[in-house]
Image: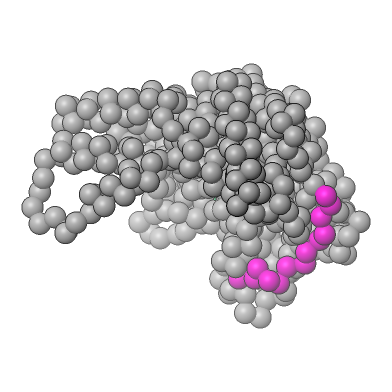
């Protein structure tokens, strides 16, 4: 057994140390070889060492090198070495972190990590905190708490009686709302098409002058960090209006909430702490391995009442039960890596990680502008949108950059324009990575536009 585990650790270490030198997208022929993992359902046992060897030999070359410093797709952080190491150890523990009884260490580490996170984000230490698979489920837990709270005030028990016949709630979102919030509204019976949509400005920020009249049956969903531009909805003004009306404000801060940890970016999160609930991701900017999201609710009882389970055999003592604050029951101890990241980085290390990525995003934007390309957004955080001309050219540049392999950037449509979307969210990205990526993008764009105009 020891040999099996140390062999796997060795393979993992080799992967991590070599990934910076590999092309970012896997070669198509390596992806094709994944067929070798399939075949008929195995009838007989096989040697565990051979299973791990097969997984490494065929699986590792076919990964997307999203932990390398030159992956700028979606908004994706890579695991810090210390969080990966903590993940390996926690994997060995194999704790069921749903209950205090099944994992005292999982439960305790959640409490510690929750308190540290509240301090980092400037949220009340009395918040209810739930650890989830990602920001989607963190949004779910928060909005379930909102649903509970507003309907309870209206004399209705949503958890017991469902929504048929319940007093209607209105959900207000910005025109640039993240799709995960809409998905969550569909799962909560609040309806993704039943929302009131507030127009956004040229950076994708909600325009508070267009806010509808709010009341105590309204949930307003703000965004801290637009997935295209990185822009923040104006929280101060909207929270003040919601507060007067008795409305609930929820903040989707999957990656943007981390700006609060960085002295030169925290101005962006002004007013955000006045909300009622907040969702964020650990597996984006905090650089912990998948999967990890966190839900915060100002009044812990609302989150607890929305998530609690009871059964005689689940009878619990006075401890905080992790499963009472998140949708899942049995689950991994995902706060362990959050704890390791914060314990290792400290406040200053975390601030430097966020600031560095933001500086590198600016460097990206300035360098691409100098090459003659158009940057479409104000680069306030870590997101850069670039056009290479007409939509077809931009589309081809993105595809060619992805297949060339120096770096990986995705595409998006921004206010009617096709754009390359560059997200600098990794602890591993350096100035050299940005410069090498800009050089590759510029080279490819020149070649692509030339061949496009000729052919
Ligand atoms: C990534 C993201 C989400 C969804 O998070 P998952 O971790 O993928 O569930 C929600 N909102 C925003 C703004 C995001 O960037």
The reply, left or right, for residue 8 in relation to residue 223 is left
Which residue lies at the image location 60% right of the left edge and 46% below the top edge?
A: 451
Which scheme is used to colour this image of the protein? one colour
Q: Which residues are magenta?
A: 189-202
Q: Position of residue 218 (x, y in %)?
A: 77, 63
Q: Residue furthest front?
A: 454
How many circles with numbers are drawn on the protein?
0
Q: Quadrant of residue 290?
A: top left
Q: Position of residue 338 (x, y in %)?
A: 51, 33
Which residue lies at the image location 62% right of the left edge and 75% below the top edge?
A: 163
Which residue lies at the image location 78% right of the left edge and 50% below the top edge?
A: 204
Q: Position of residue 4 (x, y in %)?
A: 18, 31
Q: Is residue 194 magenta?
A: yes
The reply, left or right, for residue 30 in relation to residue 119 is left
Camera-nearest residue between 276 and 47: 47
Quarter of the figure with the N terminus: top left
Q: Quadrant of residue 18?
A: top left
Q: Is residue 249 magenta?
A: no
Q: Is residue 159 above or below residue 350?
A: below
Q: Residue furthest right?
A: 209
Q: Residue furthest left?
A: 44
Q: Is residue 202 above or below residue 440?
A: below
Q: Position of residue 34 (x, y in %)?
A: 29, 48
Camera-nearest residue between 302 and 313: 302
The answer to whether residue 164 of the structure is visible from this angle is yes
- The kind of secondary structure the magenta stretch mainly shows is loop
Which residue lies at the image location 8% right of the left edge and 52% below the top edge?
A: 44
The answer to whether residue 155 of the structure is visible from this angle is no
Q: Is residue 289 above or below residue 324?
A: above
Camera-nearest residue between 188 and 5: 5
């Amino acid at each position: 057994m020891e040999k099996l585990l140390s062999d796997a650790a060795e393979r993992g270490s080799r992967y991590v140390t070599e990934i910076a030198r590999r092309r970012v997208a896997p070669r198509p022929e390596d992806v094709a070889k994944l067929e070798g993992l399939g075949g008929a359902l195995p009838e007989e046992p096989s040697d565990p060492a051979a299973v791990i060897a097969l997984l490494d030999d065929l699986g590792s070359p076919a990964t997307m090198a999203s932990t390398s410093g030159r992956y700028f797709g979606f908004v994706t952080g890579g695991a810090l070495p210390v969080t990966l190491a903590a993940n390996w150890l926690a994997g060995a523990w194999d704790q069921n972190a749903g209950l205090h009884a099944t994992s005292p260490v999982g439960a305790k580490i959640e409490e510690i990590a929750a308190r540290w996170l509240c301090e980092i984000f400037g949220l009340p230490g009395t918040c209810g905190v739930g650890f989830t698979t990602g920001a989607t489920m963190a949004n779910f837990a928060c909005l379930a708490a909102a649903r509970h709270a507003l309907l309870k005030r209206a004399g209705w028990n949503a958890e017991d009686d469902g929504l048929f016949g319940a007093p209607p709630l209105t959900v207000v979102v910005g025109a640039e709302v993240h799709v995960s919030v809409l998905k969550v509204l569909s799962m909560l019976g609040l309806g993704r098409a039943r929302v009131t949509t507030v127009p956004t400005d040229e950076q994708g920020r909600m325009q508070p002058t267009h806010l509808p009249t709010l009341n105590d049956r309204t949930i307003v969903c703000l965004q801290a960090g637009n997935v295209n531009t990185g822009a923040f909805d104006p929280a101060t003004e909207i929270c003040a209006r919601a507060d007067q009306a008795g409305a609930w404000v929820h903040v989707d801060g999957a990656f943007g909430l981390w700006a609060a940890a960085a002295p030169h970016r925290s101005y962006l999160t002004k007013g955000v702490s006045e909300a009622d609930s907040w969702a964020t991701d650990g597996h984006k900017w905090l650089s912990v391995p998948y999967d990890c999201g966190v839900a915060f609710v100002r009044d812990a009882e609302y989150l607890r009442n929305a998530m609690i389970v009871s059964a005689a055999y689940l009878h619990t003592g006075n401890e905080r039960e992790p499963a009472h604050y998140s949708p899942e029951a049995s689950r991994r101890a995902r706060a362990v890596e959050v704890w390791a990241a914060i314990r290792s980085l400290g406040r200053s290390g975390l601030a430097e990680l966020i600031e560095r990525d933001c500086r590198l995003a600016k460097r990206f934007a300035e360098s691409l502008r100098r090459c003659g390309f158009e940057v479409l957004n104000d680069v306030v955080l870590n997101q850069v949108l670039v056009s290479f001309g007409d939509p077809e050219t931009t589309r081809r540049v993105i595809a060619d950059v992805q297949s060339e392999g120096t770096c990986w950037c995705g595409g998006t449509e921004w206010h009617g324009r096709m754009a390359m979307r560059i997200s600098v969210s990794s602890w591993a990205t350096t100035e050299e990575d940005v410069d090498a990526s800009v050089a590759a993008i510029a080279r490819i764009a020149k070649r692509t536009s030339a061949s496009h105009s000729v052919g």
